[in-house]
Amino acid sequence: MPADAPTILATSMGFNRSREPWRPGPIFTYAFRLAGAIERPRLCFIATASGDKAESIRNFYAAFAGSAVRTSHLALFDKPNVPDIRAHLLGQDVIWVDRGSVANLLAVWRVHGLDDILRECWQAGVVLAGESAGSLCWHVGGTTDSFGEVREFTDGFGFLPYSNVVHYQERWELYHRLIAEGVLPAGYATDAGAGLHYRGSELVEVVADRRNAYAYFVERTAGGGVDVTRLEPRRLR
């Protein structure tokens, strides 16, 4: 049973990677509920942003070993690991996009046609979710360290008509300047541990898996400054 509307979870959280094996955070249960698949959800992990790092893929499978979650992954290096990418992704309840380089992720996905495939999945009710690069990619643009020092990027997929920033506490000054200068449109930012739930293109809830993790809406003012609204999250258990 797919989600009842196009759904994106754009987050600065996911796995507890300090544990061995990784421990899935509560955002996954939240995603499965939105997908209407709490009992035996189908979850596909995409690690393009880290170059399909084998260690990350192994840790993903270990994190859900022994659970009811039906896990799979999509790798694109050095060639796709599934015969039909479109059919595989449309068959999922949740697609989780891991962190890494958003610039590399966008370039590789476009070569393989994932921009169109993932839009189709989104519109079909597959929940699109992810952390860091897996948050940024769905938006118009944001900030990234994909090129070395942190700078703007403006060629996101644009499923969501906003900019997006993760690591807000470290990047807020640059983000505010980019919005004030009109380089980026108004958008949403998250602290570590916070996430954004979009229904269609509307933000419907902010969630967090820890204390003192917030989201922020940042927009340009008529005078060329910015206005910042802190958004209180609902704590996930």
Image (cartoon, grey):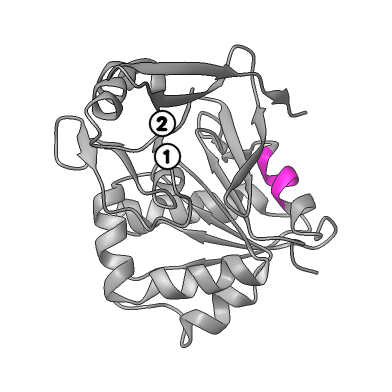
Task: Point out which mark residue 132 bears.
Answer: 1
Which one is in front, 110 or 193?
110
Residue at the far left in the pictured view: 148
Q: Amino acid at mark 1?
A: Ser
Residue found at x 27% / y 53%: 155
C-alpha distance separating marks 2 and 1:
6 Å
Q: Is there a contact, CB below 8 Å, between mark 2 and mark 1?
A: yes
Above or below — where is 157 with respect to 13?
A: below
Main SS of the magenta part reads helix
- Dividing the picture into quarters, in which one does residue 150 lie? top left
Per the image, the residue denoted by label 2 is: 166
Per the rendered image, the range of residues in magenta is 27-31
Percent x, y for residue 24?
64, 41
Q: Where is residue 30, by image quadrant?
A: top right
Q: Secondary structure at mark 1?
A: loop
User: Magenta span has 28?
Assistant: yes
Where, quadrant-wise, is the N terminus in this rendering?
bottom right
Q: Secondary structure at mark 2?
A: loop
